[in-house]
Image: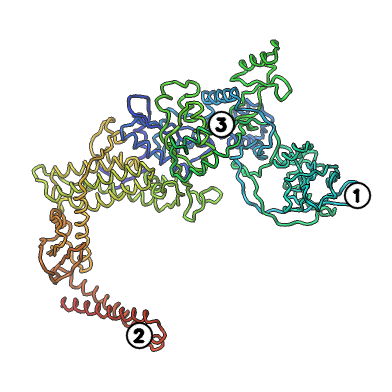
């Protein structure tokens, strides 16, 4: 086949991806090999490929491709997460466009719309991952709402309930009024926001006295059921046992005492609204206060809000402040900064709300998960280690997990109510089993399934994804099946630190509860992808490039290299498209090196030259040294450093040095021994580079010679690490210093490479002369002469050795050298004029510090010496 003159990624990538798929290289089944398993952090089914996915999945693909080359049974399980809040919101929005309201549909009808939406859009991100080169076992693609996955989730819920770990409680929860569901504490982001502190005057019943309270939320006065003072506060002893009147609604409420009230904050009087603040709820429970919920589920006011009924809480805040001011109730307003909880998903401001919810007790479940990461016999390695402190803080302060959501998209909670009481329910895997339990519990054998009503709430999305490493291998439903026993525990998990608690910690908890084993060995936590200004990439900022357009412009390999070169382990990634350009240029450099090699004509009768023999011996040692470095980098998840080591090996050692050493003279053939050795070197380079640049490497590999599917690069054998000669590497390093010195003289003196030079050496180092033939070839030195004393000519040093190149008009371009020296002379004379002008200025000489004057005089003498040298050189050219 003719080798194209340029590497065109757009013509190569689909071809090889289809080839890999057709030959089933990505698929894994249990066998006698050592398994290497990664489960993908399932992206939201609503998602499209963004820079975070690109980085995360490139890293996973590098690890999985390398494991495949190392002869392991590599299994990378892909899939998507149903993302209950985000997906339900998108489906509701789509239905709204069609004039359909969710409330007009049955649950089954809505779920059908949701599954239709998933079928239409759910696979987009996985298809996009293929463009990146992700070598997932697509036959194993899982979805957290697949029937068998849902069955596993329900089975676990029932089991945990039966163990007494899941309970139903009436608690203050985080309510997202936009998604109209509860959120766990971890799904709430606390942001500092500037607002106001409103000082309101409450009348005291039966007197002309008043008290003043300070609140950030004047709209909640409709839910006030007490005023609280500190019993030790002497300012308010006259209020004890009295009652206050809530403004506007004129409800009479008690004045209670509790040391909870901060004497220093606000006015010292606290309005108590048990339905809308967790601390107020605790006070309410302690003092048996009435609970008045003033909000609808969308955070508009209900009938308790009187004339504000139906209006949004923030609209009411502005309007009520105005009304209170007009009525003389608002004493003053101050600017106040406080922390506001917002929904991670919808960004809506969270409303504390009392609600019946399902909770999972976490304290005891968390203990094995803490020991697994932080104990003396820790089994799970977090990379970087700095995240252990975050993990410790979360896990040692873990709270019960609110696992119910007021949504339809998700696994429906398997609790079945048979009566109107809060405790009139049973928990079972299906309605038939629930009926048996209900009959048993009620002693009523006449009950039928239509007497049962299933809880309408769905489970938190994370309650399905925390089972992911087990459920993808059916390890919950069939705990001893061949696949779970072979692939579990998995090896590496690659994810972002933002879900260290949401997902990673909970998977560890589930792993020890259901397999009594860790779910994975290593957790590599990537940094966030940021732009050059260190801003987090996001659609709203418009600083996140289109992932597919990047692949189109730079090729998948170029983008992979660009991402990884900017991704030091665990630190944030300052993404720069120039690095993708560097990746593309790297691909072109390798392609051109390959074309150069394939362009050489082979003479079977030629003997291998000494230069090639020693050059190849050096490169073998350098390759082995780099291979050991790469291994060390991989063991520490320093993928950026591993790639840079390969980059330098190929760009510098292979392309700039080895190919120059072995390439035949212009239009001359190469010997067979050297050619075969160079092809082997190239193939080994392709093997170590393949995990990072799979498309380019497979293309070159298949061009080198005819290959059967069993000989494809993707399943070839990774080079073995062997002992190597450190001395030859050091000697070559020294030789490159000599070559660079001679090249500098040729450049400075305008000596054409076609003109041979003589090299004289005063050899203090007593190094091996083995590389002299290489130095001669790379510098066109006719001979290398070892002498005892200096020789006239241009000189340089390498360590303590002195090198001399005699200069004569015969071997330099006199005209070019004269022009260059005259330009240097002019610059030096101009510089000297400036110094001498300064030194002739009496004010400068008398006022400047002695050190400054000394420095100027040194510059003068150095410049005079330089001018003499240039003039001498010019004279020698005449």
Residue where numbered disc 1 is placed = 207
Q: Name the residue tied to disc 2.
A: 839
* SS for callout 2: helix
Q: Is residue 558 above or below residue 852?
A: above
In the image, what residue occupies the spot 54% across and 33% down? 366
Mark 1 to mark 3 CA distance (whole Å): 54 Å
Left or right relative to 250: residue 52: left
Within-10-Å neighbours for mark 1: few <14, some 14–19, many 20+: few
Q: Quadrant of residue 555?
A: top left
> In the rendering, at what x and y percent does residue 179 appear?
64, 38
Give the label, 2 or 1, closer to the camera.
1
* Residue that sits furthest to the bottom in the current view: 842
Total labels drawn: 3
Q: Position of residue 513 (x, y in %)?
A: 51, 27
Check the picture and name the quadrant holding the N terminus: top left
Helix, strand, or loop for circle 3? helix
Q: Position of residue 622 (x, y in %)?
A: 24, 47
Q: Residue at x 14, y 42 (%)?
A: 673
Tell me the CA gap for discs 2 and 1: 93 Å
Label located before the other in sequence (2 or 1): 1
- Residue 364 is marked as 3
Residue at position x 61%, y 34% in the image? 400
| Residue 133, numbered label | none
Judged from the image, the secondary structure of the residue bearing numbered disc 1 is loop
Task: Check the picture and name the quadrant holding the C terminus.
Answer: bottom left
Q: Disc 1 vs disc 3: which is toward the camera?
A: 3
In this rendering, is residue 489 above or below 828?
A: above
Q: Quadrant of residue 849?
A: bottom left
| Residues under numbered marks 2 and 1 in contact, where contact means CB atoms less than 8 Å apart | no
Looking at this view, is 790 or 592 the one in front? 790
């Amino acid at each position: 086949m003719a080798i194209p003159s340029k590497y065109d990624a757009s013509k190569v990538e689909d071809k090889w991806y289809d080839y890999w798929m057709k030959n089933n290289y990505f698929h894994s089944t249990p066998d006698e090999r050592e398994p290497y398993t990664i489960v993908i952090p399932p992206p939201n089914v609503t998602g499209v490929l963004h820079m975070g996915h690109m980085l995360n999945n490139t890293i996973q693909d590098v690890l999985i491709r390398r494991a495949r080359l190392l002869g392991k049974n590599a299994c990378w399980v892909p899939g998507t997460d149903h993302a209950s809040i985000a997906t339900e919101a998108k489906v509701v929005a789509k239905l709204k466009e069609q004039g359909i309201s969710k409330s007009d549909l049955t649950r089954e009808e809505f779920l059908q719309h949701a599954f239709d939406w998933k079928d239409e859009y759910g696979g987009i991100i996985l298809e996009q991952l293929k463009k990146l080169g992700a070598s997932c076992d697509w036959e194993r693609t899982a979805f957290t709402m697949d029937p068998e996955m849902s069955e596993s989730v329900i089975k676990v819920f029932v089991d945990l309930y039966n163990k007494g770990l899941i309970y139903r409680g009436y608690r203050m929860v985080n309510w997202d009024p936009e998604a109209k569901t509860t959120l766990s504490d971890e799904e709430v982001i606390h942001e500092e926001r500037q607002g106001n502190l409103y000082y309101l005057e409450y009348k005291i019943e039966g007197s002309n006295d008043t008290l003043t309270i300070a609140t950030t939320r004047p709209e909640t006065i409709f839910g006030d059921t007490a005023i609280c003072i500190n019993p030790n506060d002497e300012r308010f002893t006259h209020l004890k046992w009295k009652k206050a009147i809530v403004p506007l609604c004129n409800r009479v409420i008690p004045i209670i005492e509790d040391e909870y009230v901060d004497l220093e904050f606000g006015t010292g009087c606290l309005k108590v609204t048990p339905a809308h603040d967790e601390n107020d709820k605790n006070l309410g429970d302690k003092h048996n206060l009435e609970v008045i919920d003033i909000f609808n589920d969308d955070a508009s006011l209900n009938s308790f809000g009187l004339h504000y009924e139906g209006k949004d809480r923030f609209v009411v805040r502005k309007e009520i402040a105005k009304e209170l001011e007009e009525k003389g109730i608002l004493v003053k307003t101050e600017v106040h900064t406080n922390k506001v909880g917002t929904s991670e998903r919808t960004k809506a401001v969270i409303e504390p709300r009392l609600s019946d919810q399902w909770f999972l007790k976490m304290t005891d479940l968390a203990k094995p998960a803490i020991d697994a990461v932080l104990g003396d016999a820790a089994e799970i390695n977090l990379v970087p280690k700095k995240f252990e402190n975050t993990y410790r803080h979360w896990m040692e302060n873990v709270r019960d997990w609110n696992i119910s959501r007021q949504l339809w998209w998700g696994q429906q909670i398997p609790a079945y109510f048979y009566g109107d009481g809060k405790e009139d329910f049973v928990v079972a895997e299906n309605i038939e089993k629930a009926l048996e339990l209900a009959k048993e519990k009620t002693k009523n054998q006449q009950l039928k399934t239509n007497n049962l009503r299933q809880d309408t709430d769905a489970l938190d999305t994370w309650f399905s994804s925390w089972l992911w490493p087990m459920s993808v291998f059916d390890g919950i439903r069939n705990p001893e099946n061949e696949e779970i026993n072979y692939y579990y525990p998995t090896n590496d998990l690659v994810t972002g630190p933002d879900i260290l608690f949401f997902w990673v910690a909970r998977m560890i908890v589930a792993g020890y509860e259901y397999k009594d084993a860790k779910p994975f060995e290593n957790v590599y936590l990537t940094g966030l992808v940021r732009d050059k200004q260190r801003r987090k990439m996001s659609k709203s900022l418009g600083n996140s490039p289109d992932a597919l357009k990047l692949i189109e412009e730079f090729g998948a390999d170029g983008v992979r290299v660009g991402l990884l070169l900017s991704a030091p382990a665990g630190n944030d990634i300052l993404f720069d498209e120039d690095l993708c350009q560097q990746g593309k240029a790297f691909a072109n450099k390798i392609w051109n090196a390959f074309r150069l090699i394939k362009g050489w004509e082979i003479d079977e009768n030629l003997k291998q030259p000494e230069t090639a023999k020693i050059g190849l011996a050096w490169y073998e040692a350098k390759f082995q040294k780099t291979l050991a470095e790469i291994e060390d980098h991989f063991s520490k998840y320093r993928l950026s450093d591993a790639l840079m080591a390969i980059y330098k090996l190929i760009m510098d050692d292979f392309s700039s040095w080895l190919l120059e050493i072995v390439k035949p003279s212009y239009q001359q053939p190469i010997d067979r021994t050297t050619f075969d050795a160079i092809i082997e070197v190239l193939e080994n380079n392709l093997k170590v580079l393949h995990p990072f640049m799979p498309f380019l490497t497979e293309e070159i590999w298949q061009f080198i010679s005819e290959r059967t599917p069993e000989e494809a690069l993707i399943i070839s054998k990774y080079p073995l690490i062997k002992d190597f000669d450190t001395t030859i590497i050091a000697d070559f390093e020294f030789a490159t210093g000599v070559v660079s010195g001679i090249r500098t003289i040729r450049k400075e003196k305008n000596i054409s490479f076609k003109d041979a030079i003589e090299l004289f050496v005063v050899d203090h180092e007593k190094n091996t002369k083995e590389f002299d033939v290489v130095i001669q070839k790379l510098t066109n030195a006719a001979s290398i002469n070892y002498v005892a004393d200096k020789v006239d000519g241009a000189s340089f040093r390498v360590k303590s050795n002195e090198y001399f190149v005699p200069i004569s008009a015969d071997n330099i371009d006199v005209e070019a050298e004269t022009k260059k020296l005259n330009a240097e002379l002019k610059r030096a004379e101009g510089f000297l004029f400036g110094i001498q002008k300064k030194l002739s200025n009496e004010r400068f000489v008398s006022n400047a510090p002695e050190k400054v004057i000394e420095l100027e005089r040194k510059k003068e003498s150095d410049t005079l010496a330089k001018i003499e040298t240039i003039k001498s050189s010019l004279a020698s050219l005449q």
